[in-house]
Amino acid sequence: MEIKNVTASFSALSQETRLEAFRLLVRHEPEGLPAGEIARQLAVPHNTMSTHLSVLARAGWVNSHRQSRSIIYRANLEHMQQTLSFLIRDCCAGHPEVCEPLFTAFTDCSLDTEKE
């Protein structure tokens, strides 16, 4: 992943509604959610949500497919993994103990959601 792609990705997430939409879709993996349901849950007008979802799709954060009359959106977890990998690629400069807490945080994330 190149830095221009990463900055475009972060630019897409730097807006509150888009970040909330992406986090909502991550919680609804692997089924995804219809665009209207995303708009309803975030209390955003449908046309505004459509614009936000388009920005997220262009940046690679979400994928969509048509299911009957609805468009179902899903978080693109592969894109999230690539972006996070880009951020930590140079981590620790040969000292893995420096980055160990970061890796532990990622492996413990499933445990954290079960506590909530």
Image (tube, grey):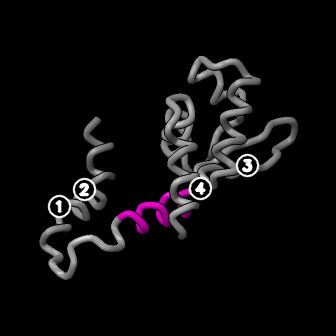
Q: Does the magenta stretch include residue 80?
A: yes
**Secondary structure mostly taken by the magenta-highlighted segment of the chain:** helix
Q: Is residue 47 left or right of residue 81?
A: right
Is 54 above or below relative to 65?
Answer: above
**Badge 4 vs badge 3, beta-carbon distance below 8 Å:** no
Name the image quarter holding residue 53: top right
The residue positioned 23% from the left and 60% from the top of the image is 102
x and y, in percent, of residue 28 in the image: 54, 42
Please tell me whether mark 4 sits on a helix, a strand or a loop. loop
Residue under numbered circle 1:
101
Residue under numbered circle 4:
76
**Badge 3 vs badge 1, beta-carbon distance below 8 Å:** no
Please tell me whether mark 3 sits on a helix, a strand or a loop. strand
The earlier-in-sequence mark between 3 and 1 is 3
The residue positioned 73% from the left and 23% from the top of the image is 46
The earlier-in-sequence mark between 3 and 2 is 3
**C-alpha distance separating marks 3 and 1:** 34 Å
* The C terminus, quarter of image: top left
Please tell me whether mark 2 sits on a helix, a strand or a loop. helix
Asked whether residue 30 is in view, the answer is no
The earlier-in-sequence mark between 2 and 4 is 4
